[in-house]
Image (spheres, grey):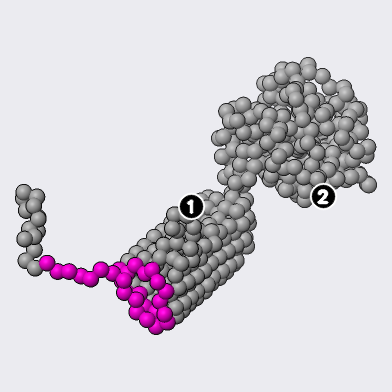
Amino acid sequence: MRSNQKIEICILAAGLGKRMKSDQPKVLQPIAGEPMLEHLLRSARALAPLRIHVVTGKGASQVEALFAAADINFVHQAEQKGTGHAVMQVLPHLGEASRLLILLGDAPLITPRTMQRMVDADCDLGVLTAEVADPHNYGRVIRGSGGELLQIVEERDADEQQQRIGEINTGVMVTDSQSVKQWLDRIDTNNAQQEYLLTDIVDLAVKDGKQVQAIKAIDATEALGVNDFEQLATLEREHQRRLARELMRSGIHLIDPARIDIRGKLTAGAGSRIDVNCVFEGECTIGKNVMIGPNCWIKDTLIDDNAVINPNSVIEGAVIGSDCSIGPFARLRPGARLERDVHIGNFVEVKQSRIGEGTKASHLTYIGDATIGAGVNIGAGTITCNYDGIDKHETHIGDKVFVGSNTALVAPITISDGAWIAAGSTITRDVAPGNLAIARGRQRDIEDWAGPQADGKSGES
């Protein structure tokens, strides 16, 4: 980088996204659960720029409301007259002697490392290029006999020979504020698009005898842009491959790295294994030697060491202690907190409840707004009746309680340590320590029951 120059970043985010046929601004379309612009801003901030200028167009109010921050200067491009015209809107806001990095809002996979390479390049104008197998729709890079950059020709302006060139312009450029002002003053709309094209400044810089560099991307996927949902899906997969690669390098065993989706941040300890078709959203932390079965959806959850999440479990906002076993087909809702060695089995739902060490609810159970002690057995078909139609109420269960199958615990209620609840009971009053509570209708046997008759009448006499 030129000595003593401050870095400013300009992100062109005014694209209409016509081919998406969406009312949502293109830069707000998601990759890994976050808007494309969010990815770019995170990478740009890694360079600690003096300021980030974001050029908005369609849906400017939505973009500005979502990303308003002290380090961002929003500049509105009222008319879409090309990339050069977009940068023109930023010129009045630039410092006198700043290094300007220009990024595209719909090309979010560029890394901070590549951005830094651009900023550090010893040139008056640097253009990020990439070698691609299919250069269709991209501007072609024209080099001289010595490999120097001479010109960028847009596809619609390229002749047949130029269209066969595989090195393309990514749209990312670096220059300084004074030079870009001078060059943009001299460009015109004499091209097939009838727009002010930013790429025209390359020809002007060459003619001015300036140092112009074509800086080839190490990874061509950083050049990928989005114009439609098919391209958005391509970038999604590429981003997910990057995330999967990082996990595997940190010691995580992914059964198939092509079948994992991380929509947020996933931190995992070494020795853990994640099976296919798992989706992680928000902030998820997984300890060491955790086993996660296929088809699980996990959001904003902490899972401690040696836990097992069996297939088809849905977990959100939970804290799961070490050595726990969850599922299959379990659902943990926000506020579920499980101590060590808790077993939550198939078709069990837990919401806003704390469950003590070694407690088991093996199947077909609902636990809501409850505090449950250690060593408790919750029988199949048990429910905490926590909602009276207006308010939620709490259930408290002490240590070493046995709750029989098909039991309804009507909150507010306390089941004290060591109590027993008989199967099929509806418990409406507190149960003292060590007591057995039975609350069910007395069995009545009718002798010589004949069963239904053909005329539909009961056989009871």
Residue at mark 2? 48
Is residue 152 visible in the rendered image? The answer is no
* Residue that appears at 94% across and 47% down: 4
Give the magenta-colored segment's residue range: 419-446
User: Mark 1: which amino acid?
Assistant: Asn
Type of secondary structure dominating the magenta stretch:
loop
Question: Is residue 198 left or right of 448 when viewed as pictured?
Answer: right
Residue 295: x %, y % from top left: 46, 54
Is residue 429 visible in the rendered image? The answer is yes
Specify few, some or many for label 2: CA neighbours under 10 Å numbering under 14, 14-19, or 20 or more.
Answer: some
Q: Quadrant of residue 143?
A: top right
Question: Is residue 432 left or right of 109 when viewed as pictured?
Answer: left
User: Mark 2: which amino acid?
Assistant: Ala
Residue at mark 1? 277
Specify few, some or many for label 1: CA neighbours under 10 Å numbering under 14, 14-19, or 20 or more.
Answer: some
Residue 351: x %, y % from top left: 49, 61
Q: Quadrant of residue 299?
A: bottom right
* Residue that appears at 93% across and 46% down: 3
* On screen, residue 289 above or below 27: below
Q: State the residue in front, 416 or 273.
A: 416
Q: State the residue in front, 144 or 196.
A: 196
Q: State the residue in front, 21 or 354.
A: 354
Residue 329: x %, y % from top left: 41, 58
